[in-house]
Image: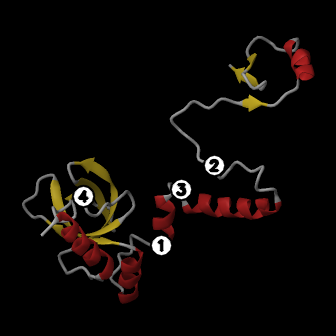
Amino acid sequence: MSKATKRKHVVKEVLEDCVAPTEDQHIMRVLGSNGNNLHEAVTGSGERFLVSMPPKYRKNIWIKRGDFVIVDPIKEGGKVKGEISFILYRDHIQYLRKIGVWPEGFQEDGASSERNGEKPKERSERKTEEEGEGDSDSEDDDSDLFVNTNRATVLYSESEEETDEDEEGDNDGDEKEEDDDEGRALKTA
């Protein structure tokens, strides 16, 4: 079987089949990848261990932090204590909730907010803030822009040349003001 044909069948199996876990299988959430097709995962009760990706899924199906999987336990495993048998997507999760097999530790409120890295309280506060800002002009709002955390933040302040001359005499020595190429004032401490 060619690679393309194999990939087609594996993807079709994962997307179309709805599988319920057996008695010895666990539903787990992936916390991150440790390399070499090993993933750290947590059960609904909070138990963490490494699970391996079987060869049929490697380079065909990709999982990321926060995805849910069904895991077969490996009894003789030292560090790696399970193997992924099925990857769950939104439709699969809804099906498992409907039949009542979904673990109590993975409730919808906690799972969706943990994927975004925020607590449920913070999410509700953010929603109320967004509702209040709905009237403001969306062109001036930069809150939806991507923030690169790999760069140091530099504060830019728009100023005119007249205000720069007035402020130069008021500096107390802790802050320096410099103009960048576009005429904006840079403040560095």
| Secondary-structure class at tag 3 | loop
Mark 4 residue type: Lys
* Disc on res. 118: 3
Mark 1 crowd level (few <14, some 14–19, many ≥20, 10 Å Cα): few
Q: Foreground mark, 3 or 4?
A: 4
Quarter holding the C terminus is top right
Mark 3 residue type: Glu
Residue that appears at 30% across and 51% down: 33
> In which image quadrant can residue 14 be found?
bottom left
Question: For mark 2, what is the residue?
Answer: 145
Q: Earlier in the sequence, mark 3 or mark 4?
A: 4
Residue 129 x, y percent position in the rendering:
73, 59
Residue 57 lies left or right of residue 151; in this view the side is left
Q: Please indicate, yes or no, whether residue 139 appears anywhere in the rendered image.
A: yes
Mark 1 residue type: Glu
Question: For mark 1, what is the residue?
Answer: 108
Quarter holding the N terminus is bottom left
Residue 128 lies left or right of residue 145; in this view the side is right
Residue 162 x, y percent position in the rendering:
93, 20
| Secondary-structure class at tag 2 | loop
Residue 186 x, y percent position in the rendering:
73, 23
Q: Foreground mark, 1 or 4?
A: 4
Mark 4 crowd level (few <14, some 14–19, many ≥20, 10 Å Cα): few
> In which image quadrant can residue 157 be found?
top right
| Secondary-structure class at tag 4 | loop
Residue that appears at 92% across and 17% down: 166
Q: Foreground mark, 3 or 2?
A: 2
Q: Foreground mark, 2 or 4?
A: 4
Q: Foreground mark, 1 or 2?
A: 2
Question: For mark 4, what is the residue?
Answer: 59
Mark 2 crowd level (few <14, some 14–19, many ≥20, 10 Å Cα): few
